Amino acid sequence: MSNSDSNGGRAGHDPSYGHDRSYGLSLPVLLTALGISTLYLAAQLPEFVQRGQQLPGPRYFPTILGVFFCIAGVVELVRYIRHKRHARAAGRLPADPFFVRLKSVTGDWGAHSVAIILGSLAVFVPVVQVLGFVLGGTLFSTVLMLRLKARWYNAIILSLVVVLVIAVVFGRLFRVPLPAGILGIRL
C-alpha cells in the first residue's frame, strides 16, 4: 500500500490533524501581541464604581477581548509546536528553516490579513477624527471587506448600511457622541 493510498489519496496529508494547513509563528505572535496590548490599554481605562460597588465598566469588554486574544495565541502556539514535533517525527522538516519561516510570514494570507486589520485600526482612529464616523467607518469597513475578497460594490453598499445602522443606534438611541469630521455629518 503506497503513501497516497493509506491516507485517503492525498500525499503529505495527516488525517489526525483534520486538514492541510501551513503552520507558522506569525499568527500566534500577532494574536498574543494583540492580546497583551489590549489588556494594557484596557488597564488604562477608568474603573466604574457606583454607590461604593465596583461594576463592569469601560474596562470589561476590552479585558475579555484581550484575554481571548492571549488564549487564542497560546492555542495557536501549541498547535504550531505539535505540528513541528509531528513533522520532525515523520522526517518532513525542511532543509533550510530560515527561508521556510520567512516564506510563511511573507506569504501567509492570514498574517497579511491580521497586519492589514491592525494597520487599518491604527489609521482608523485619526482618520475618523478628520472624516467623521460615517465616512471613516465606511472607508475602514470597505477596505476590510475588499481584503476578504468581497466585490467592490457589495463592500461599499454593505459598509455604508452597517455604518449607518451603527451611527443611528449609538448616535441617536444611546446618545454616544460620534465624530462628525470636517464635513460635519451627524445622524
Image (cartoon, helix red, strand yellow):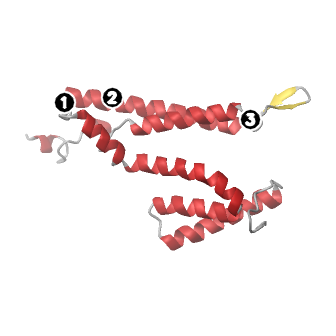
Tell me the amino acid under the disc marked 1. Answer: Ala
Tell me the amino acid under the disc marked 3. Answer: Leu
Q: How crowded is mark 1: few (under 14 residues within 10 Å), some or many (20 or more)?
A: few
Q: In this figure, which residue is indicated by the disc labeled 1?
A: 90
Rendered location of residue 61, percent (x, y):
68, 39
Residue 35: which quarter of the image? top right
Q: How many marks?
A: 3
Rendered location of residue 23, percent (x, y):
33, 38
- What residue lies at 24% left-to-right and 34% top-to-bottom? 97
Residue 113 vs residue 165, the one in the foreground: 113
Distance of label 1 from label 2 (alpha carbons): 12 Å
Residue 16: which quarter of the image? top left
- N-terminal label among 2 and 3: 3
- What residue lies at 44% left-to-right and 63% top-to-bottom? 149
Quarter of the image with the N terminus is top left
Q: In this figure, which residue is indicated by the disc labeled 3?
A: 45
The reply to whether residue 19 is visible in this rendering is no
Rendered location of residue 49, percent (x, y):
85, 30
Q: In this figure, which residue is indicated by the disc labeled 2?
A: 82
Distance of label 2 from label 3 (alpha carbons): 38 Å
Report whether 60 appears left or right of 140.
Answer: right
Tell me the amino acid under the disc marked 2. Answer: Arg
Q: Residues within 10 Å of mark 2 (few under 14, many from 20)?
A: some
